[in-house]
Amino acid sequence: MVLCFLSRTLQLARYSSSPLGRQLCSASSNKPVLTLFTKKPCPLCDEAKEVLEPYKRRFILQEVDITLPENSVWYDKYKYDIPVFHLNGKFLMKHQVDIQKFEDQLMKLELQNDGNQ
């Protein structure tokens, strides 16, 4: 129950412009956050998650259901494009996983994190 609450809090904080929201996200982990904009059902999203399965220990997956009322901005933006992925809050790819692009960007973030420790 606490994990579910914390997960939801971090999800809401991720797109918050408040300093507290940013602190919650940065303090939660040094792993990059991969945000998947999705809806149910979404067979392409399920397929994309399978492709990313071998990498799951290297990032935190955050799913955003664009059909929920609080995500209407994302629905308007991505309703014809899911799955859409952001890595650490920046657009990365849409429609399908570009594994080379994903690996390159993930490695870049991991190297930055290693340099900051």
Image (cartoon, grey):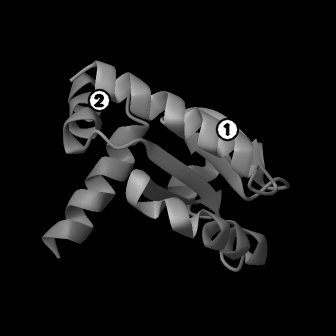
Using the image, determine if residue 25 lies above or below residue 7: above
Towards the viewer: 54 or 65: 54
Using the image, determine if residue 70 lies above or below residue 20: below
Disc ID at residue 100: none
**Residue 104 horizontal side relative to residue 78, left or right:** left
> Would residue 104 be seen by someone viewing this image from the given angle?
yes
Is the N terminus in the top left, top right, bottom left or bottom right quadrant?
Answer: bottom left
**Residue 44 horizontal side relative to residue 109, left or right:** right
- Return the x and y of residue 72 as percentages of the image width and height: 63, 50
**Res 87 → quadrant:** top right
Residue beneath the point at 59% across and 34% down: 105
Is the C terminus in the top left, top right, bottom left or bottom right quadrant?
Answer: top left
**Res 101 → quadrant:** top right
* Crowdedness near tag 2: few (<14), some (14–19) or many (≥20) residues, C-alpha within 10 Å: some
Towards the viewer: 58 or 65: 58
Determine which residue is flagged by label 2: 22
Towards the viewer: 75 or 28: 28
- Return the x and y of residue 77 as percentages of the image width and height: 75, 42
In front: label 2 or label 1? 1
Q: Amino acid at mark 1?
A: Leu
Dot 2 or dot 1, earlier in sequence: 2
- Return the x and y of residue 113 as percentages of the image width and height: 33, 28
* Crowdedness near tag 1: few (<14), some (14–19) or many (≥20) residues, C-alpha within 10 Å: some
Residue beneath the point at 82% across and 53% down: 81
Secondary structure beneath disc 2?
A: helix
Secondary structure beneath disc 1?
A: strand
Determine which residue is flagged by label 1: 92
